Image (cartoon, rainbow, N blue to C red):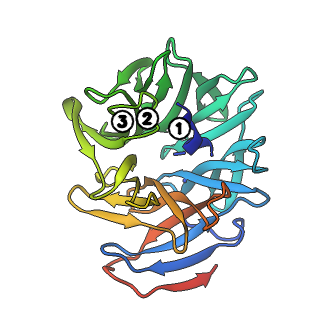
Amino acid sequence: MQNQIAKHISKKVMLWVGAVSALLAFGVPAQGQSYVYRTVEMPGAVVTRAFCNNNSGQIVGRHDTDLQFSGSYGYVLTQGVFKTIAYPGAVRTIAACANNHGEVVGAYDDKKGVQHGFLWKSGAFKTLDYPGAVGTFAFTINDSGTIVGGYNDATRSHGFIFQGGNYKTIDFPGDAGSYANTINNSGQIVGEYSLTDPYVGSAIHGYWMTGNNNFTTIDFPGGQDTEAQGLNNNGQIVGDYLDSSFNEHGFLYNGSVYQTIDFPGAAKTIAFEINDSGQIVGDYANSDYTYNFHGFLAVPIPGTEKASQRGSRW
């Protein structure tokens, strides 16, 4: 599960002013919806990543105090105020997503290096471990409290759903390995799978699972290694893909049309989640391609098909 862990450590994040440092907004032309992009930076952090946003104006993610990732913590950003999320006694904590009730899921590493999922609710933590797994990560929680994520057994990775106190495996039919990344309030799930890689580090395809376990593959046209990361209650999907030159881009898929999502001037963009207002969160890396990631929020410009690029600072 290390590839997925790297994304969430290094996941799977409304508008605010003041507490976020160096917020730069751009209106960017696109074939389809245009957006104003805003950088998300936690004050004092070396790395900030935005993994999830809900309809209540919160963003959830991870911040690091150094590029060696020796100090990794989750955060929840609410109305301009960052709150650190750290599992007691853990050596590393990642907050992956929050539902509209402010319930947060993610993962932590214990002192033995074992990874566990968690639920943070009303200020209290609950550990989530898939039975028999060697590592568990909780990726998303919907408003009914249903959680999806991923786990490793001795031979491969799997997706899971946790509902009513019970765990159930979710695997794409015929896959070698898979993860379940997001669940919406209708119970639809998006995730990723590989037919050849049991830990889903290569030859990756996205999927969309609807009622009665109907799976649809999500592949960006002409791209490779497509990952379906986020899904809102309107059926819009976001994720990332590699182009023919192995450059990473975010994307938006509305059920019939794909659109690339790129933070202006970035060398790498990942779109992790989309809320019901169509606001997208993710992260980007600058041209040096170091691990100095930045979170972003992309806000749709109403009624736009194309727009002139412009910049402004909050």
Vertical order, 88 against 98 (above or below): above
Residue of label 3: 193
Q: Residue at point 46% right, 67% down?
A: 262
Labels 1 and 3: the sequence-earlier one: 1
Residue extending furthest top? 132
How far apart, in angstroms, are the residues tagged by discs 1 and 2?
7 Å
For the residues labelled 3 and 2, say whether their Cβ atoms are less than 8 Å apart: yes
On screen, residue 65 versus residue 300, left or right, reads right
For the residues labelled 1 and 3, say whether their Cβ atoms are less than 8 Å apart: no
**Kind of residue at disc 2:** Val
Q: Residue at point 32% right, 32% down?
A: 195
Vertical order, 111 against 71 (above or below): above
Residues 235 and 121: in front is 235
In percent of width and height, residue 209 lies at 27, 37
Residues 40 and 241: in front is 241
Q: Residue at point 67% right, 35% down?
A: 123
Mark 1: few, some, or many residues within 10 Å (few <14, many ≥20)?
few
For the residues labelled 1 and 2, say whether their Cβ atoms are less than 8 Å apart: yes
Residue of label 1: 3
In percent of width and height, residue 188 lies at 30, 39
Which quadrant would residue 291 be assigned to in this image? bottom right
Labels 1 and 2: the sequence-earlier one: 1
Q: What label does residue 200 carry, if any?
A: 2
Kindly state the secondary structure of the residue where label 2 is placed.
loop
Q: What label does residue 167 carry, if any?
A: none
In percent of width and height, residue 125 lies at 65, 28
On screen, residue 114 versus residue 217, left or right, reads right
